[in-house]
Amino acid sequence: MTGSALAVGLIICGTTAVFVSTGLGKLAAPEASRAAVAALLRLPEPRAQRAVRLLAVVETLTGIALIVPSLRTAGAAVAGVLGLLFAGAGLVGRARGLATPCGCFGQRDSRPLGLRSVLVGLALGAGALVVLRGAADAVPRPDLLPIGVAGLTVLLAVWIWRDMVRELVRPRPTAATHD
């Protein structure tokens, strides 16, 4: 396996993990993103809710398309467009001084659209460009991509929900029993 093939495989796995996580997070908790979408696009609540659900489905399907060899090019193209849209949303959010949490992963307490959204969007766009430049065909073991995606998605979920994970693994005090 060449270094470039490994890099492309990791880019595909990482990009897929991000899109699947954000898409499923928005599908599970669309209200977390609804306010940010409403403020960003100046949409009324019902339309913002539909926009969030549509975005969630597109993100999830984009992630899935990236690991299916026959859909990878289309998935990378959509991933690139979404990355640029996220970067643009971050710029607009920062310019308008929006304080509404983005709810990107279904979290109510996430940060507002801003510089981090710009950087993540540009990284997703750059990753999509690498895949589109033909390096996706260089992945020698495409059968391992789902395993890599699953592992990175779990790691991403643990990081995103780290406060909840800490609560789950922290020993809980037990009530003292008296005889």
Image (cartoon, rainbow, N blue to C red):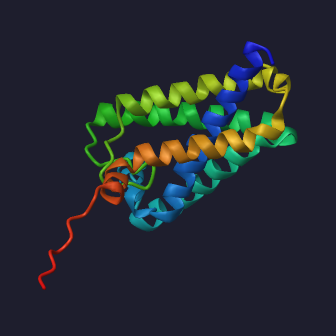
Residue at image location 81% in from the left, 43% down from the top: 68
Residue at image location 13% in from the left, 85% down from the top: 179
Left or right placement of residue 177 versus residue 115 in this view: left
Q: Residue 25's spot in the image, x, y percent? A: 50, 56
Is residue 103 visible to the viewer in this orientation of the structure? yes
Q: Residue furthest top?
A: 3
Q: Residue furthest bottom?
A: 179
Q: Residue furthest left?
A: 178
Relative height, residue 31 to residue 123 (above, below) = below
Left or right placement of residue 148 versus residue 100 in this view: right
Residue at image location 36% in from the left, 39% down from the top: 113
Q: Residue 22's spot in the image, x, y percent? A: 52, 49
Q: Residue 156's spot in the image, x, y percent? A: 50, 43
Foreground residue among 81 and 124 = 124
Left or right placement of residue 70 versus residue 109 in this view: right
Is residue 52 visible to the viewer in this orientation of the structure? no
Relative height, residue 164 to residue 139 (above, below) = below
